[in-house]
């Protein structure tokens, strides 16, 4: 699953963190890393007038032409590829026109995991930093055919992984992915279940323990009564977790990022891997689903 990674780059600091995180993972799995840049669509002069963040301007040169951006983007991709190759990994660079999320989804068919920053250039301009996710990252999470790793504020070794576990199919998928990750990297797993029902929580964690016990993994389970918004950051601080895996159930017609994913990304600053289950045929979105936990 982690032997091929797709990294979306746009010149933002967050994208550079995503690249560094992908290299750390790539070194563990000897992964091939595909580096993608999607330029602004023709006619988006407002975006171009602001300039690309990786271009250095001289005095009085605040305007960037499309040619400037294309040349600088290629240099950015070349620099990123060189960083990947210095780590002893295979790198591939791609420039592709189109909607960012659509291009990422298309290329994702040939990789195992997509790695992106939480909010890039477009997101910062659109939300002025008030949203924990940029529009492209948001679109990708809800529609990606592959797991999406949203980088934190800085790259981490991802050697103590918190698994947000509710016991449903989506959580089982995230737990299985975390198990595979830990089995290869030697990471410690902390499985967290948040529930007001202690008996239900113990049963859920017993199922998780049973699944993880099939392999020689280092793991602990944790049951907390409360809500995600307080339980997640408190657990991360207490245990020193530096990555989080969560599941999300995708249903037909569901075009919002699941509520629990929004919460997790809002209250954390570590890498978060979102594992989405395939669509359920004929399923209908309901308000109760939007309020559900992490599958």
Image (spheres, helix red, strand yellow):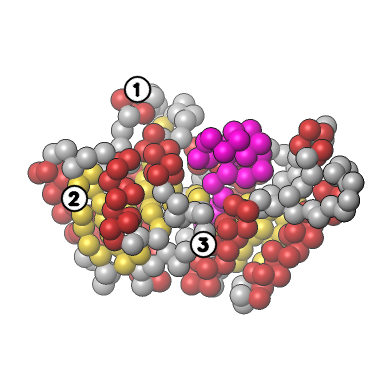
Tags 2 and 1 touching, CB below 8 Å: no
Residue 41 located within the stretch drawn in magenta: no
Tags 3 and 2 touching, CB below 8 Å: no
- Classify residue 285 as left or right of residue 135: left
The spot of residue 149 in percent (x, y) is: 49, 52
Residue with the mark numbered 3: 155
Dot 3 or dot 2: first in sequence order is 3
Q: Where on the picture, by quarter, is residue 18? A: bottom right
Residue with the mark numbered 1: 287
Residue with the mark numbered 2: 223
**Which residue in the rendered view is the most extreme toward the front?**
59
**Which residue in the rendered view is the most extreme toward the left?**
199
Mark 1 closeness class: few <14, some 14–19, many ≥20 residues within 10 Å: few
The boundaries of the magenta stretch are 112-136
Q: Where on the picture, by quarter, is residue 241? A: bottom left
Residue 287 visible from this viewpoint: yes
């Amino acid at each position: 699953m982690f032997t091929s990674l797709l990294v979306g780059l746009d010149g933002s600091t967050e994208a550079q963190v995503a690249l560094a995180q992908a290299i750390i993972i790539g070194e563990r799995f000897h992964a091939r890393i595909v580096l993608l840049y999607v330029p602004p669509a023709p006619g988006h002069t407002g975006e171009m007038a602001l300039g690309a963040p990786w271009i250095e301007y001289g005095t009085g040169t605040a305007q960037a032409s499309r040619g400037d951006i294309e040349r600088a983007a290629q240099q950015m991709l070349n620099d990123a590829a060189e960083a990947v190759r210095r780590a002893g990994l295979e790198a591939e660079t791609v420039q592709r026109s189109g909607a960012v999320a659509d291009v990422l989804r298309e290329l994702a068919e040939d990789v195992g995991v997509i790695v992106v920053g939480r909010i890039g250039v477009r997101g910062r301009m659109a939300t002025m930093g008030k949203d924990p996710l940029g529009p492209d990252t948001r679109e990708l999470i809800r529609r990606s055919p592959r797991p999406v790793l949203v980088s934190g504020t800085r790259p981490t070794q991802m050697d103590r992984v918190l698994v947000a576990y509710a016991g449903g199919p989506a959580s089982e998928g995230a737990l299985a992915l975390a198990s595979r990750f830990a089995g290869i990297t030697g990471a410690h797993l902390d499985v967290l279940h948040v529930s007001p029902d202690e008996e239900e929580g113990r049963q859920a964690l017993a199922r998780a323990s049973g699944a993880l016990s099939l392999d020689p993994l280092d793991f602990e389970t944790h049951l907390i009564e409360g809500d995600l918004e307080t339980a997640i950051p408190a657990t991360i601080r207490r245990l020193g977790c530096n990555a989080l895996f969560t599941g999300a159930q995708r249903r037909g017609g569901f075009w919002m990022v699941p509520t629990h994913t929004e919460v997790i990304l809002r209250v954390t600053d570590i890498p978060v891997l979102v594992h989405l289950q395939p669509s359920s045929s004929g399923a209908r979105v309901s308000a109760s689903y939007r309020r559900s936990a992490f599958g």
